[in-house]
Image (cartoon, grey):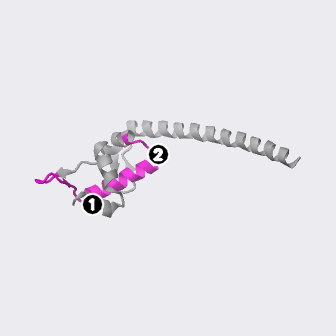
Amino acid sequence: MLIGELGRRTGVNPHQLRYYEAQGLLVPDRGGNGYREYGDDAVLTVAQIRKLLDAGLSTQEIRYLQPCVSGAGPALEPCPETLDLLRARIVELDEQIDTLVRSRQTLREYQTATERRLAN
């Protein structure tokens, strides 16, 4: 299938599919006319990429994990490197969440103090 058809089947625009290709996540064949040609398996690959992106992983992390991805879940093979990457990413997210919670609390304190001054 050509890139437009893959885009229609996955809901991902061709520009984004070209980006996935540039990042080494999606590898099309080339027809005699030079057009990108994708096999039916590309639909699953794009779905896997989208789910991993939704999980907050970078394209570099996805490229690293891609050999271990299977199914539409996506499911990952439990190799130590995969678990190390996932655990490290979760630690980073926890740290970001903690920072955001502190920021929200500080902003609420400013808001409350400002509303009190407004009321006086």
Three-letter amino acid code at disc 2? Gly
Say few, some or many: other residues with alpha carbon within 10 Å of mark 2 (under 14 / 14 to 19 / 20 or more).
some
Q: Residue at x 15, y 51 (%)?
A: 34
Front residue of 108 and 116: 116
Front residue of 105 and 117: 117
Queried whether the magenta region covers residue 48, the answer comes back as yes
Q: Quadrant of residue 47?
A: bottom left
Q: Which residue is drawn at 36% across and 42% down?
A: 65
Which residue does the numbered mark 1 point to in the structure image? 4
Q: Which of marks 1 and 2 is in front?
A: 1
The answer to whether one can see residue 28 in this image is yes
Front residue of 71 and 27: 27
Say few, some or many: other residues with alpha carbon within 10 Å of mark 1 (under 14 / 14 to 19 / 20 or more).
some
- How much space separates mark 1 and mark 2, taking CA atoms? 26 Å
Q: Can you give x and y, in whole percent of width and height, for residue 75 in the image?
A: 38, 51
Q: Can you give x and y, in whole percent of width and height, for residue 67 in the image?
A: 30, 44
Q: Can you give x and y, in whole percent of width and height, for residue 120 in the image?
A: 89, 46
